[in-house]
Structure formats: C-alpha cells, structure tokens
Image: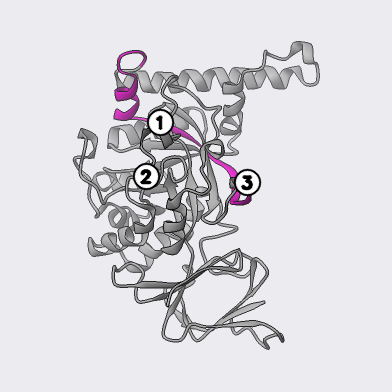
Amino acid sequence: MKCIYNGKIHDAIHPDAYEGRILMDGKKLVAIGDVGDIPENTEMIDAHGMDIYPGFVEAHCHIGLDGYGYGYEGQDYCELNDIATPQLSGVDGVKAMDEAFKQAMEAGITSVCTGPGSANVLGGTFTTLKTVGKRVENMIIKPVVAMKCAFGENPKRCYKDSTDSSRMTTAAILREMLFKARDYMERKDAAGNDVLKRPAFDMKLEALIPVLKREIPLKAHAHTSDDIFTALRIAREFNLRITLEHVTEGHLVPEELAGEQVPMAVGPSLTNASKYELRNKSFTTPGVLDKAGCQVSIITDAPVIPQQYLPLCAGLAVKSGMDEFKALQAITINAARHAGIEDRVGSLEVGKDADLIIVEGNPMEVSSTVHLVIIDGEVVHTQG
C-alpha cells in the first residue's frame, strides 16, 4: 500500500480543496480524506506544502501516431489513399515509446485519447491509453472509444483532386457509408446463424456497426458553426451518439449548442489561425460554452500543441474568463467523460485507478512544478 499525506487534495469533483490522506492499494484508490488507521508496512509519501490532483486527461490528440521528431516517415495518423477508412484502428498506429508520452507523463498527463487525424471523412477508431509503457497493449485503458469523422476543410483539401471538393460531398459520403452500414447490419441480423444468407463480409461496414448501435460515438472534427450543425444533423438522422471536437466557433452559438447536450472538446487554441475555418479561434470559447451549460473539455490536439502544455491551455482559458475549477474539470473528469473512461480516471474517488500527481504551485501556471507522478499506483516520475 501507499499513503499520501500532508497535501491539499483537489479531487476534481468538489470545488474546494481539502486536507486529508489518500490510500492506494495496488492499482486502485481505496480511501480518501479520513482514511482511518494506516496498515503496517504502508509506504508513506509526504506532500507537505504541495497540492494533489488527479492525473490530467487529454480528450483528443494524436500522440503516438504523430509525435516527437517524426517527420513524414514516422507519421501514421491519416490514410491518404481512401477518404473513408472506418476499419482502421488507432491502436495499430501507436508507437508506445514515442518520446512525447514521456514528456506528457512528466507534466502530469496520465491518460490520453488518441487516434486517426482528420484527412478522411471517416478515419477509424480512437483508443485510450496511459502514458507509460513499452507496448501499446499494456497501456490501454479502453481499446475502442469512438469513431473519428471529419467535416470542413481537411477532407476537402486532402481529396480535392479526386473525391471531395465541397462540404456537401463530405456530408454525402458520410451519409452513404452510414446508409450502407445500416443495410448491411439489418441483413446480417435478419440472416441470424444462416451463413448462406449473410451479406458478404465488408470490413468497413462491419466497423460502423458499433456506431449504429450507439456503442461508441462519432468523434466529429468540426471547427465552424456550420460544420458543427451538419455533424449534429447527421447524428440525429441516424440516431447516433456524437462528441464534438475542436468547436472553434462554439462561442458564437453557445445557446444552440447548450441545447444539444453533447460533449465538446475545445482546442487547440494555442496556435495561429492557420486556415480560414480557424479565423474565430479564441481562448474564451471553453468558458463561454461552460457558462452556457455545456460539458467542456480542453484539448491540445497533440502534437499540434505539445501534449505537456495541456494544463497551460486550461490556464489560458482561465485567463480568458473560464472558472478555474471548471477549467480543472476540463482536463480531468470532463475529459474522461468525453472519452468514455470516467469510471477509471479523471477524478480522485475511491475505486478509481490510482493516477495522481503532486504539484508545487498551480499546475495551470508556468511556474508550477510536478514533483511526483503516480500511474496505476506506481511512482513513475519524481523531481526534486
């Protein structure tokens, strides 16, 4: 067992920090606050004068598929020969020993949701990982959490000379794939155990069945308000679950989005407005959406912003008007909810994974120092 004492606990559930102890047994949190008698031979960790937080969670990135020092040769986050590739799995592209994982972990980011990029209308599935390990299978929290799809400029730019040169085409391609997958699923279900009556196996359509059954959401890349509403419209047509990714113009339509009650991951905001659909980029967006009643996560879209600067992005949202506790939730429990792993990570609660950090100073400020990182109950980083 391990016990952390003398620190101030920020559990990401209660707005106010409090004094107490945290007891870990193996990979799990077993007591928080008044933990009672400490068993003999418990390893004691003194957090005197410091603050204890849950490990930070990234709700949307491409770490491991496009990481540190890759260049073109190391990039595996987009298939550029086919505009619709739902059969691809982000797990298969992850390089577990990417230096970016180590940099993220040392900054207190302990869990990430990573997967294909946005060149394709359908790009494949996202996965969730811890940020330590040498083999991807040993890092997985939940192997498949969402199906990536993309609206806006990226599919148009990547396929403008062959397949897609308008937003209408992007929407039509997505609808066509969903219609085909629904027909395939219905024929397969109708056939039952009769192999001779089943439709010919189609890996693309097979990959979309969990989306149609609402087992996983569409993870919809959409920056502009028009693209956001197209994504929501198509999800409604097919009765799909959906999460919105980037939501760059969300602050322009907060009331409309609040009524949708879908998770929103905002960012990357710490970049130049490098294309037309980013011209309204602002760090005010997460705060405006939160105040309107939306579930908001803050993201780096790493490596667009290096993964280790996730807490800094939350701090810049606070500087632009977001409530500090809500900003903390945007990189902890809300991000975990967005990725569908809130039962495991994102807050300091009994029964969850023992993923936590001990920090000197406010982690959303550049002057802070992450002194200790624990993942699955093991100390994986110490400083000072």
Magenta-highlighted residues:
138-163
Quadrant hosting residue 130:
bottom right
**Mark 2 touches mark 1? (CB < 8 Å):** no
Q: Is residue 73 above or below residue 261?
A: above
Q: Is residue 210 above or below residue 62?
A: above
Tag 3 or tag 2, which sits nearer the N-term?
Answer: 2
Which of the two residues, 11 or 137, is positioned nearer the viewer here? 137
**Label 3 sits on residue:** 137
Amino acid bearing label 3? Glu
* Residue drawn 63% across the image and 46% down it: 137
Quadrant hosting residue 120:
top left
Residue 16, magenta (yes or no): no
**Label 1 sits on residue:** 233
> Of the residues tagged 2 and 3, which is closer to the observer?
2
Q: Residues within 10 Å of mark 3 (few under 14, many from 20)?
A: few
Q: Residue furthest top?
A: 196
**Mark 1 touches mark 3? (CB < 8 Å):** no
Real-space Cα separation, disc 2 to disc 3, in angstroms = 23 Å
Amino acid bearing label 1? Arg
Q: Is residue 367 above or below residue 149?
A: below
Real-space Cα separation, disc 1 to disc 3, in angstroms = 36 Å
Q: Quadrant of the N terminus?
A: bottom right
**Label 2 sits on residue:** 69
- Across and down, in percent, residue 250 comes to 29, 45
Which of the two residues, 155 or 326, is positioned nearer the viewer here? 155
Amino acid bearing label 2? Gly
Indicate the secondary structure of the residue bearing disc 2.
Answer: loop
